[in-house]
Image (cartoon, rainbow, N blue to C red):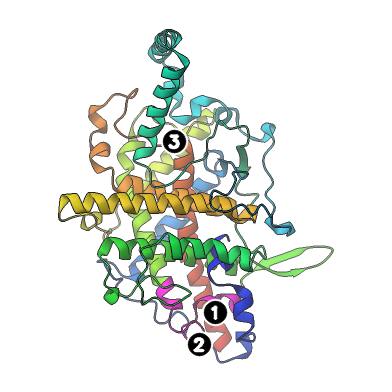
Amino acid sequence: KLLLDCLYCKSAFSLNFHNPLHMKQFPTLKSVTGTLDDCACDVETIDRFNNKEIFPKLQKLLSSDYFRFYKVNLNNPCPFWTDHSQCGLKYCAVKPCTLGEVPEGLKSSSYKYSEAASQDIEECEKAEKLGAVNGSLSDETRQALQEWKKHDDESDRFCMLDDEDSPKSQYVDLLLNPERFTGYKGPEAWRIWNSIYEENCFKPYSVKRPLNPLASNSGLCVEKRAFFRLISGLHASINIHLSARYLLDENWFEMKWGHNVSEFQLRFDKELTEGEGPKRLRNLYFLYLIELRALAKILPYFERPAFHLYTGQHTQDNENKKLLLELLHVAKSFPLHFDETALFAGNNKEAMKLKEDFKLTFKNISRIMDCVECFKCRLWGKLQTQGLGSALKILFSERQIDAMPNTSNTNPSFQLSRQEIVSLFNAFGRISTSVRELENFRSLLSNLKQ
């Protein structure tokens, strides 16, 4: 929801339009077809592949304990402005887990890498030796070593991660805190997206607000076009979730959540958005291809025997790893993957500079999530930006991933924390759900016109 009213303020639309269901029904999705820009793929192929092959398997995986419990710090201060106001709407609240609700395996530090690593005697011996060495170091030197390690861990990341050891970090059950419309809107929400688009994006001067990332004639290089399309696609995806899980009715006995076609049209109809809505939806498909490609590339990491989706529930953990590998093999089988080698190519020095700008800009965007005042919006905003950041980290760590068979389990050439893994798959789950929901909205719009 986070990225919802932030970019397209609902109140702004309500000043200009009445309920579109009382108006002519515009062909909202008819122009969202065919080949995508900068890709060798088309919308129809993605729809079929996602809805039949990916979506069912992914939803089953995300309902498992390893992926449903996400550790997050929702109390980080905003690093960009000092306004400490909080959303008072009841649907903005997040219910954290009690310790008894979280599987034991997740609460121990051993979950970070694998069950095998937590039981490895050699590792224990090395830890003891390390402890002896550390005992002979000064506090300043030990602190410096920790800072160097932290720098090494963060150098390949495209987003900021929460400190899972912080007492302010809490587990949240994502299934009990779903992403949906909360009513968060207005100037505070607008400021979030204004910061993202106006201050932290490679913005072409020709773009209108709400900002549209992309026409191929914008004069931007492929990397900067890609950056815009990722942000636009993420925003479009979240707006679909909010339109699909909208509070339609509330009384003393129940709350009815469902598809709000009016809300969907206000955000994506071609005429109501001056031609921008269908472009936003096409950027959703571009984002889907980027994250799908990351899943295909990370398969060797999860295929290692030493890796486990460790929760302490042995039978369930083994079944979930089989399901995970099955899903990743399906992802790899997609015939029209995005070619990431087209990014950051050309002159090596310029490419490296552009990649670093790309990385720093996305990290800044991930930090803006701590400024979102609606806690449920903040939760899902942090998770989805972290997931996209993890996907980008995978796409541009090809050499490290290829080197994994030649490195030891104790010092792998590439590593993902559990936070990165959980956010990666849940973020793709949100994108996959959005693509699936477009089919539902096509059907609803078609029925309204009959």
Q: Is residue 271 magenta?
A: yes
What amino acid does circle 2 point to?
A: Phe
Do residues under tags 2 and 1 come within 8 Å of each other at their CB atoms?
yes
Q: Amino acid at mark 1?
A: Gln
In this rendering, which labeled residue sits more in front, label 2 or label 3? 3
| Of the image marks 2 and 3, the number of the one nearer the N terminus | 2
Residue at 58% across / 68% down in the picture?
A: 5
Residue 417 in the image: state x and y as whole percent: 44, 35
With respect to residue 130, does 326 lie above or below? below
On whether residue 116 falls in the magenta region, the answer is no
Q: Is residue 47 visible?
A: no
Q: Amino acid at mark 3?
A: Ser
The residue wearing badge 1 is 265
Label 2 sits on residue: 26
Classify 10 Å Cα crowding around label 2: few (below 14), some (14-19), many (20 and above). Answer: some
Cα distance in 3D space between marks 2 and 1: 8 Å
Q: Quadrant of the C terminus?
A: bottom right
Quadrant in which the N terminus appears? bottom right
